Amino acid sequence: MTAGPPGAGPGSGGPAGLGALVPAPLIGPFVPWLPADTAPPGGVSADAWEPAGLAGARLAVKDVIDIAGVPTGSGHPALLAAARPAPAHADAAARLLAAGARYTGKTHTDELAYSLGGTNAHYGAQANPAAPGRLAGGSSSGTAAAVAGRLADIGLGTDTAGSIRVPASYCGLYGLRPTHRRADRTGMAPLAPSFDTPGLLTRTLPLLAAGAAALLDGSGEDGPPRRLLVPADLWACAADQVRAVLRPRADGLGRALGLRPDPAPLFDAGAPVAHGRALELFSLVQAAEVWRAHGPWVRRERPSFGPNVAARLARAERISPREEDAARADVARVRGWLARRLDGAVLVVPATPTAAPRWGAAASGDRSALLGLTCVAGLGGLPAVALPAGSPLPVGLCVLGPPGSDEALLSVAALVP
């Protein structure tokens, strides 16, 4: 086991290292400083191997989640250089392994997992096996690429602002963001704990359901939804061509459920805040928690970051306690309102506003449009299932439900044509 890749020392570009690094080329999914065993059981060809359940399923683990005996690098070489081997598996990993999965390797993530682009200024941009020449999406970028490239069968990642759902959409995968707190975060590096949750990526819905059964605590809400929400304000975040591909799938789900899709805005006149303000609140509270988790280390070590992550950290450093407290009060109001709005309902939206951006373009396209779709789950602590629905490039549909409806959502996802 090596100490880490070159460049593991601290940087010198201000509190967040603005502009200190140049992004590296496209890379593979697994971190190069740890061994990976991606062979299917019994010498079966990877193209032919598709596990029926978790027994023998190859598990790729995002490098913010502990695996006993290996370091957790969190997407930054300075953290990797200081890391010691984890004393135990993270709870989420231990549950999947106990259910029969086989650990196959640690996967790349964006810096601190504080991005949705699938790029890392230290290690490179994650190649997308499902859409060559395009990005895989972040921050569970390497995990998604390992599963999409058939080097793993199930990926254990994290989702704070969409880091399961975005790479699922870009890579043509199924993804689960659980109800907040139904999946234990022990042994997982924090980003913004109010929104952080472990999550899963697979190529098939049955394997996603098997992973969810192992991962989730307690019993979920049963019963089919009574309402189908396709709110115009959230669908407006997506590009015309994405809506054209996905809306027939949403309508088909309505026919399967016997429900008429309701296009009324989610953030209507009765909402405590407008949609744009909800996004601002999410980003503000997330940033405040990111700085609480990582700010002391950033100030002490002055590590280098890519420009986008650096800019977010610089903004996070400036958030005042009064600003954070006011935002938290509004987030609590939004969370309660979303729980009431989604009671008995399933919410169907595009998982991302576009297909995967080309390598060398903006890392995640219009970040505001992207977060406008993904922040709802975080604000509400809601479960979300992303499922592949696009052609010719991968793009995903996302179904969300009230807290605790994870299992019901997986059943709903199976009805999407």
Image: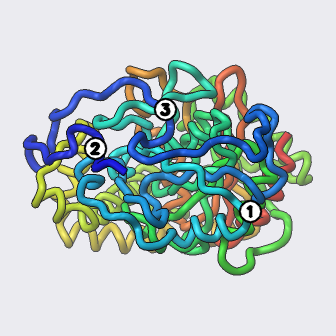
- Rounded to the nearest whole Å, what is the CA distance between mark 3 and mark 2? 21 Å
Check disc 3 and report its element: helix, strand or loop.
loop
Which quadrant holds residue 101? bottom right
Find disc 2 in the rendering and name its residue. 309
Instruction: State the separation of the CA atoms marked 1 and 3.
Output: 39 Å
Give the mark, 1 or 3, whose residue is nearer the N terminus: 3
Q: Which residue is mark 3?
A: 28
In the image as oriented, which residue stretches furthest toward the bottom? 218
- Seen from the viewer's position, the closer of residues 326 and 15 is 15
The answer to whether one can see residue 233 in this image is no
Residue at screen point 58% across, 55% down: 156
Which residue appears at 81% of the width and 63% of the height? Answer: 225
Q: Nearer the viewer, mark 1 or mark 3?
A: 3
- What residue is shown with label 1? 345
The percent position of residue 185, horizontal first and vertical second, equals 49, 71
Q: Amino acid at mark 1?
A: Ala
* Front position in the image: 358 or 245: 358
Q: Amino acid at mark 2?
A: Val
Q: Looking at the image, is 238 positioned above or below residue 334?
A: above
Q: Earlier in the sequence, mark 3 or mark 2?
A: 3
**Residue 126 appears in view:** yes
In percent of the image, x 70 and y 20: which residue is there?
392
Q: Is residue 143 left or right of residue 303?
A: right
